[in-house]
Amino acid sequence: MANRPLAERMRPQTLEDYAGQKQLVGKNSVLRKMIDSGHVPSFILWGPPGVGKTTLAKIISRQLDIPFFTLSAVNSGVKDVREIIEKVKSTQYFDSIRPILFIDEIHRFSKSQQDSLLAAVENGTITLIGATTENPSFEVIRPLLSRCQVYVLKSLDAEDMIALMHKALAEDTELRKKQVEVKETAALLRFAGGDARKLLNILELVIEADDNDQVVITDATVIDRLQENPAAYDKDGEIHFDIISAFIKSIRGSDPDGAIYWLARMVAGGEDPKFIARRLVISASEDIGLANPNALLLANACFDVIHKTGWPEGRITLAETTIYLATSPKSNSAYEAIGNALEEVARSGNLPVPLHLRNAPTKLMKELNYGQGYKYAHAYEGNFVEQEFLPGEIKGKKFWFAQNNPQELKIREYMEKLWKK
C-alpha cells in the first residue's frame, strides 16, 4: 500500500467520495439518476487528464456490482476486444446485467478497432464506457458515437482541489506520519491546473522531499521542489497539454522559433503526429483566418500528409506548416464572428426564416409565398443586388468585423463598395 502513489491510494471508491463533476454525478443529475436506477447505457467521458474519468467508470461498476473489463487503447488491438466480447458471451445468461467494457484513451483506437465494438454495443452484449481527452466528434467513428451518450468532465475548481488536499492529509496513512501545515496554496493550484492526480502527485513530492517530521507547505517550497524535479509530478505524461498550449500560443504570437522548439519537444516525446496536425488546422482557422486563407489549405494538406507518412518524415511537414503559420499575419475575426452570432442565437432564439429566403419545392409552399420576392444575385450587374438576409427582428445586425490586415481591408473595401455602407 505504502509504495503506491498517493493519487492511487486516494482513488475514490464511492460517488460520495468523488471530487467535482456535480453536473454529472451530483444530486438529481442525469448520470446520477441512471446509476441510481441501475440502468446505465453506453457512454463516453470526455475531459482533460486527472478529472476522474477512469475512477467514475470503476465506481459505477462497483456500485452496480457489474463485471468490469478494461482495455487501454495504447496497447490493445482488435484481438483483445474480440477476446473480451467472446468471454462475455460465453458466460452471459439471459437475465444477467451487461458487463462494462472500459476503454481508456478510446481516441487512440483505429477505425477497425472501433468497428469491432459496434455489434456488441448495439446488441447489448456489453456496456461501453470510453474515456478520452480528445473531442469524440473527431476521434470516434460516427456509428459508434451515435450509440453512446457523451458526458463532458471539467477541470476541478479551486474549492474541490483544496477539499481533496485536506482529505488526503487527514486520511492517508503515509502523509499522517508527518505533521503537515499548509500555509499557501496558490502554487499548488497553479501547477495542478484543475488536475486532481497532478495535485496529489505534487503534494506527495513536496512532503516526501522534506526530511523533517514537521512540514510547512508554502508557494516557495512548491516551486523549489518542482524546479528540482520537474517531471516528478507528471507521472502519466499530462505535461503534453502544457506543451501543446505553449506551441499554439507561440504560433499565435508570431514566434517561429518558440513554435518550432515546442514542436521539437513533442516530436522527441513521441506525441501522436495526428494530434499535432489537428491543432495546426484549428490554429489556421482560429488565429490566422482571413488574414491568410492559404494557411488553412496548408494545414489541411499537412493533416493529410501525416495520415499518409507518419513518423519520422512527418516531422518535416509539421515543421513547414508550423513556421508558415507562425510567420503568417494573424486574425481571429472569423472566430469572433461565429461567437457573436451564437450569442445572438442564444439571446433571440429560433427566429423564423424570412419568406423570400425560404425554399419552395411544393405547390402549397409557393401558394404560401415561400421564396416570393427573392432576388437572384447572378441576374444583376456585378452578380450582386442589395436585399435583407437576416430575420426582421435583427435586421441590420453585424457579426463580422474586418481586422486591420491587408487581406481583410481588401474584403472590407469590397463589401463597402457592394453595400454602400
Image (cartoon, rainbow, N blue to C red):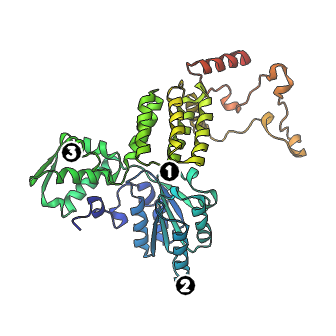
Q: Evaluate if marks 2 and 3 touch, with contact meaning CB atoms under 8 Å apart.
A: no
Looking at the rendered image, the quarter that the N terminus falls into is bottom left
Would residue 397 be found to the left or right of residue 184 on screen? right
Asked which secondary structure carries label 2, the reply is: loop
Q: Residue 93 shows which numbered tag? A: 2
Q: Please say if 152 is above or below 80.
A: above
Would residue 201 be found to the left or right of residue 95 on screen? left
Specify the amino acid type for callout 3. Arg
Residue wearing tag 3: 225
Which residue corresponds to the image point at 18% horizontal and 64% vertical from the top-left? 173
Q: Nearer the viewer, mark 1 or mark 2?
A: 1
| Distance CA(mark 1)–CA(mark 2) | 36 Å
Q: Nearer the viewer, residue 41 or 204?
A: 204
Q: Nearer the viewer, mark 2 or mark 3?
A: 3
Q: Find residue 133 and report its horizontal and vertical position in percent.
A: 46, 52
Q: Residues within 10 Å of mark 1 (few under 14, many from 20)?
A: some
Which residue corresponds to the image point at 39% horizontal and 63% vertical from the top-left? 55
Residue wearing tag 1: 134
Q: Evaluate if marks 3 and 1 touch, with contact meaning CB atoms under 8 Å apart.
A: no
